[in-house]
Image: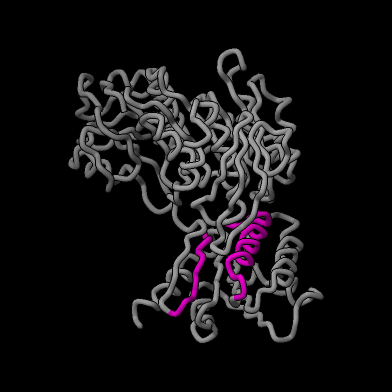
Amino acid sequence: MIALSLDRIAEITESRLSGPARPADTVTGPVVVDSRQELSGGLFVALNGERADGHDFAAAAVEAGAVAVLGSRPVDGVPVLVVDGGDPAVLDALGRLAAHVLGELPSADVIGVTGSAGKTTTKDLLAQALRRLGPTIAPPGSFNNEIGHPLTVLRADPATRFLALEVSARGIGHIAHLCRIAPPRIGVVLNVGSAHLGEFGSKEAIATAKGELVEALPPAGEGGVAVLNADDPAVRAMAARTAARVVTFSDGSEDADVYAREVDLDATGRVRFRLHVGGASARVRLALVGGHQLHNALAVAAVAAELGMGIDDIADLLGSAGAVSRWRMEVGERADGVTVVNDAYNANPESMAAALRTLVAMAAGRRRVAVLGEMAELGEGHQEAHEAVGRLVAESGTELLVVVGAEAGPIGDGARNSPHWTAEREIVAVPDAAHAAEALRDRLLPGDVVIVKGSRVVALEQVAEQLMAVEAVR
């Protein structure tokens, strides 16, 4: 955060000072929505959450070092910048503040990443690349909405060279709004899949929303670059929606600007390939686990090349950059030889298929176990999508399938009714994560490979954590 006086913040956010706020007092520290975070010299943003009203913590925030509070009502004895209109108005004010701060940092390059799957991993990988080129700001985890986005931008200061920002949408116009807060120069679109299909209604609507990122880019003559997945027709079509220069990536097409050849997935679940960029090539073995990481890596390679990184440095980066955000293909090894792959952060049909392919590659003669929960927000196609995942489970040769929760029941039906399912294999249906862990306790065999995946509502990371805790008590 750059230093700003309260009267200047009031002007930017269209708020009014109340309580003991002094116009000349200056915010020099962080801007946060959680009063438990570091607040010295900072600004606390009070929102009315589902469980608590942030204004109730305003006094504690000031006692902890906050210079003032940005909120929707005065608080006795507390310096508050008041915005009329409740939380929506406070978030608009927060966005205006972030946009102003970024506007004061003309040397900061913004790179936005979107897609139905892989946003967070790609953003994390991109941030590791950018830090080799200069001071970089990136959000933790999936801090990608109207709250997390401006808070991330407000961490920037005059030393910041890059901001790697993940932008998400639950409706048309959401990404456009985020791009007004932090206008990107480079935009990356990974894919258009089935995530949030229930909210959008169609893949066409999802594509419309994701394409708002490339529409927000400056023209090619002003440095705008759209990095698009040439293997996804809906993404490839976005080239017609931007005035920016288009750079494409592909897992095999030599017509793309950045592409991979000689691709295979090794027994550890890591992709090996030859990377081609601008006529040069280099061998790469990703540090990240999962075949689906290939497109994420190619997108990052394309951005890194645009920013001047040589192919050998790109290959070195991709071979060393590891996972940052939790519960995304985290691999744990138990003393009894059981491998647990915790991919429980979220799930959709495309990521489920990728996870099962990774299970097959990692098992390599070992027994395969899949613990799968529901894929939320799929709308009318919910049952059919889950049954299709079940058929993939059957085709993958998985010997033990644990289906978690009633909504995931069709996964078991799809597997059981598949011609690939055989009598010696087992399907266990349980109501929740706790019962899944219990069901596995007596069923796992030494050397098994277990993949755990489902949407956030199922909290399947608890299963993976309990499975790994078994080692501690032996």
Determine the residue positioned at 38% across, 20% down.
Answer: 105
- Does residue 62 appear left or right of residue 111 in this picture? left
- Figure quadrant of the C terminus: bottom left
Q: How many marks?
A: 0
- Does residue 452 appear left or right of residue 160 in this picture? right
Q: Residue furthest right?
A: 419
Does residue 255 lie above or below 15 as drawn? below
Colour mapping: one colour
Determine the residue positioned at 49% across, 69% down.
Answer: 340
Residue 239, image x, y percentages:
71, 27
Foreground residue, 352 or 387? 352
Residue 403, image x, y percentages:
62, 73
- Does residue 334 appear left or right of residue 300 in this picture? left
Foreground residue, 189 or 231? 231
Residue 222, image x, y percentages:
56, 14
Foreground residue, 92 or 300? 300
**In this rendering, does residue 365 appear at all?**
yes
Determine the residue positioned at 48% across, 71% down.
Answer: 463
Residue 13 among those drawn in magenta:
no
Does residue 23 lie above or below 206 as drawn? above
Residue 362 among those drawn in magenta:
yes
- Figure quadrant of the N terminus: top left
Q: Which residues are magenta?
A: 336-365
Q: Residue furthest top?
A: 221
Residue 434, image x, y percentages:
48, 75
The answer to which image quadrant residue 426 occupies is bottom right
